[in-house]
Image (cartoon, helix red, strand yellow):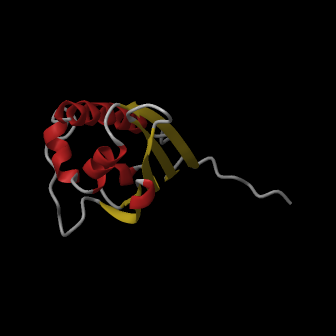
Amino acid sequence: MAEEVSTLVGILETTVDLKSSTEKFHDMFVGRPHNISDVSPSNFQGCELHEGEMGQRIESIDPENNRATYRVLEGDLMKEYKSFLITFQVTPKEGEPGSVAHWHFEYEKINEEVAHPETLLQFAIKVSKEIDEHLFSEE
């Protein structure tokens, strides 16, 4: 008997070409997330740390592969999703300067009325580009 796949569970992915280095970009998201609001003020009104977490828990960090996975624990997102996992990885471009950011969202919606998080994916692209511009201008 075939296993029924829930339409509430989904995966969305995208990549963003970057001019900045793999290490610098990864460090901004993993090492200095509190600086993101300074770099992308139109998207973040400030980033405060509450009780050691920012509404999310780090599931894993793989510095060797510039990858980090976060589980969203609270906030507006959790009003529409039972679970939400964000994996972010930066890899060097082949044979040229710069890098590529890979965003991977794995989620389960609370019901059929909830949209897939395409707007959040667009937001990740926009923020990635703003941070890239900032980091590249520092080089």
19 shown above or below 35: above
The reply, left or right, for residue 51 in relation to residue 121 is left
Q: Position of residue 10 (x, y in %)?
A: 57, 47
Q: Determine the residue located farthest toward the right in the rendered image.
A: 1
Q: In front here: 110 or 84?
A: 84
Asked whether residue 118 appears in the rendered view, the answer is no
Quarter in which the C terminus is drawn: top left
Residue visible at 17% across and 35% down? 138
Left or right placement of residue 95 versus residue 77 in this view: right
Residue 5: where, in percent of width, then height? 69, 52
- Residue 131 lies in what quarter of the image? top left
- Quarter of the image where one finds residue 68: bottom left
Name the residue at the bottom extreme: 51
Residue at point 50% right, 52% down?
Answer: 107
Nearer to us in this view, 9 or 137:
137
- Residue 7 at what x, y percent from top left? 62, 47
Residue 52 rendering spot, x and y as whole percentages: 21, 68
Residue under the image location 40 percent in, 53 percent down: 66
Left or right, 74 with respect to 135, comes to right
Q: Nearer the viewer, residue 42 or 133?
A: 133
* Rendered image quadrant of residue 36: top left
Quadrant occupied by the N terminus: bottom right
- For the residue pair 136 and 130, the one nearer the viewer reads as 136
